[in-house]
Amino acid sequence: MLTQICKIAPELAQLTSKIGPVLAFSENYLSFLIDFVKIELIEYNKKNQNVIRLLGHQKSIKCLKFSRENSKEKLLCSCSSDSLILWDIKKILEGKDLDGKLIGRNCFEYEPTNCCFDPTNQVIAVSNAFLINLYDINCHDLSKNETINSIQNTSNNSFLNIVSFENEPILLVSSTDGSIHSYKFKTDKFLLLNKINLVQIYVDFLKQNKNDENIDRSGLSVCTGLQVFRINDQAIISCATSSCLFLIDFYTNNLIYLIDLKNIPLAKSNESIIPQMAEFSLLNSKQINVALLFLFQNEIRVFKCADIQANQTEMRQTNAFSKDADFGENYLSVHPKKALNKDSPLNEGVVDKEVFKPKLATSMHEYLKTNNITKKNSISAKDKPITFTSKIKSSGYNSVVKREKFTPLINKKSSSMISLDNLNSSRQKQGPSKLESRIKQFKFEIPTVLCQKVNSTDKSSPLTLLRFSDDGNYFAAVSNDNLIQYIPSNNLEKTVQVFNGHNETIRSVDISHDGNLLLSASDDKSTKLWSLKKQMDLLIDIKSIKLSDSASFNIRKPVNAALFFYLDKFLLLGTDKNLFLCKYHIDSNKNDLQRYLNNSFVKSVKKFELTFAQSITTVSTINSFYSYLVLCGGTDKSIEVFDMNEARSCLTIHEAHSRPFHQLSQNQSDYNSLSYDLFISNAVADGIKLWDLRNAKCVSRLDSHINRYLPTKVSFSPDSFYICAGSEDRSTLVYDLRMNGIVKKYGVFSDNVSCAQFNPKKSQLLCGTQDGKIYDYHIN
């Protein structure tokens, strides 16, 4: 609810004319217009509200803006179609300077719509329908930069603000279509960072409150009040429409606070009157106030909008790349924080005693062993006869065999040998280890050059999955014709193997860490384990899982996820609402005569069930090093985290998306271990969300790509700074997580992009399309 602080009306402020349609608001001051050319300045916090009138403009004033809240000097910028004037409030209150400082005269080609200060308060930006002009407060025209098309198409009701984010200028532009665009300014161009749809946020808010019967979208166009406040390392966007006040998280686009202005009664009657303008300010770094201008009532009212301290736990967000973030003692992390428990399921391993032994002999070796039959070549040394006689010269016991004496190499002076004395010094000269030097030398660059374009299938079947091996030398391509192709990453025209064994859509594919096995799961209620060393070698066809007892679990529903886990020691199978942690054994004693006998098996170590969801949609885990955590996505739009060491569910994030998501992907970069706890979720028509596992918070949201109906696959870059995402406009976008914006766009492709995958070891990007083509991008 809004709490009124003060009211400014002509009769209270001793004004004789009507208040104009321009408003500026700061921590202590309020500025507005009288007769369109006169500026009124007032300290609204004081009981005696003395009004100071500023004169200097000849034509109608279009915009007013105070300097940044953290500035030492309090400045006011006023802009009309013929001049730009800067006012020093301190000098004005002392009565020293009431004329202001003229920065520009007749400097605008088009009528200005808004103005603002940069983070340093040294530059003033003035916007109009086509241009953004930057002016130095020392009267030097910095530049005139043409904006991109999305800003060119806005009307005169667009507004502008520049805020400080990561010490870089960020441009926020709102328009009458109910959207806010944020851009990063670089020398001569703007890079689109984010787009916020206020209409969609308002509709989702009403649906959550079960009040979506009569949604009036006509009053959701942005009119004014666009600001960004820094509070506890959180950026909060404030904006106002003709019917609502919004506080939105800059990183995630999530709604923090919403006030419906239609429910605010004014005057003595209970009639609610919609304000025509609003401006926000931050008071003492904890309270957000709002000033509402009611033209029809000819008054301005200042309200307390939100108390940040009261909602600190709700509004607090953590920087995804902060090294010094404090998450407490009980935070989750993919890095093991303790040793394995004695009763942990991860202690279960495949040892020799647990290998399944058949009742009948399945090989000649087994037959000889069971019947105590030995070969001639297998006679032990104690059974051999020993003869001591001098008559048999052929035995060689009396003769002396001449042999060269063994000379150790350490006595030889060779340039290839290192003496023990020089061992320590040589280690110091070697410097860092091979892993450290490899990480230090690797520098990921966004691929820009299209090297290859290959038709992966003859029938032009859509590609649904691309999965690189951990060494980056090969990748698996899954198409809609139920085929899996194993292809070298440096030559897409050469297919090493083709796996054809599933009858229905393949939902998951994974390659073991050692690169020897491939695991696939399908809607045909089966999971298959293939050998990558032999052509079309199906090792295990998993249609049922042995349980800890003598019983077995028959898979009767599609398997949506199948992954290697704990450095290939286990398998994770997700079907229905069950998640199985399985150990497996591959029988390597088969020969050509008895290849029909398969002694390989899969046995369940532990069975988990989702707490709330009816079915598992996706599973994610880290297999490149020992980790205990497994992430599961369910049909109830929740994320549930299982700790395999504790054998329990340790976290559930409800309503992670507005729709069930089809992908969870964890960061497994070898080159940036600080971001291992980041993971992404992907849902159709709800964009990509970046999560921090340590505090179970969404830290960023990416939705600039088009994804209305196709479950596209996305991936992290090797340095974990970028995310690539396919789009349904036949393009692929690369997001920079550090600035939450687009840095590269690929296209136009022959069809919509269904999957995009970065090579984990080098600068390479693969894009798979709906017509079965693979596009291979490298650096120059």
Image (cartoon, rainbow, N blue to C red):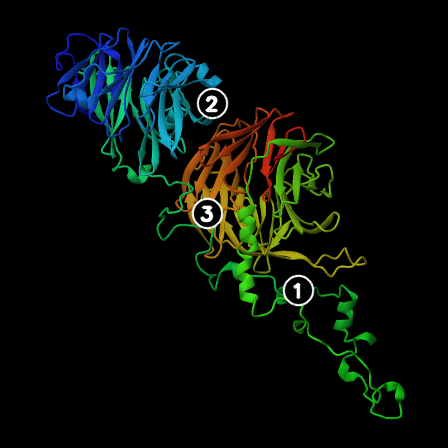
Q: Is residue 307 left or right of residue 209?
A: left
- Mark closest to the chain's N terminus, 2 or 3: 2
Q: Circle 1: is it few (<14), some (14-19), or many (20+) Cα within 10 Å?
A: few
Mark 2 element type: loop
Distance between the Cα atoms at labels 1 and 2? 59 Å
Quadrant in the rendering for residue 307? top left
The residue that mark 2 highlights is 188
Q: Position of residue 432 (x, y in %)?
A: 53, 55
Q: Name above or below for residue 79 compared with residue 596.
A: above
Say whether residue 575 is visible. Answer: yes
The residue that mark 1 highlights is 415
Q: Relative to the observer, which residue lies in front, 122 or 623?
A: 122
Query: Where residue 205 is drawn, which disc sits there?
Result: none
Q: Position of residue 641 (x, y in %)?
A: 46, 47
Q: Relative to the observer, which residue lies in front, 346 or 690?
A: 690
Quadrant in the rendering for residue 491? top right
Q: Label 3 is placed on what type of residue?
A: Leu
Residue shown at 78%/84% (left/top)?
Answer: 383
Distance between the Cα atoms at labels 1 and 3? 42 Å
Q: Label 1 is placed on what type of residue?
A: Ser
Q: Name above or below for residue 392 compared with residue 55.
A: below
Q: Position of residue 441 (x, y in %)?
A: 55, 46
Q: Name above or below for residue 392 compared with residue 128.
A: below
The residue that mark 3 highlights is 674
**1 vs 3, front mark:** 1
Q: Label 2 is placed on what type of residue?
A: Asp
Distance between the Cα atoms at labels 2 and 3? 33 Å
Q: Relative to the observer, which residue lies in front, 299 or 444?
A: 444
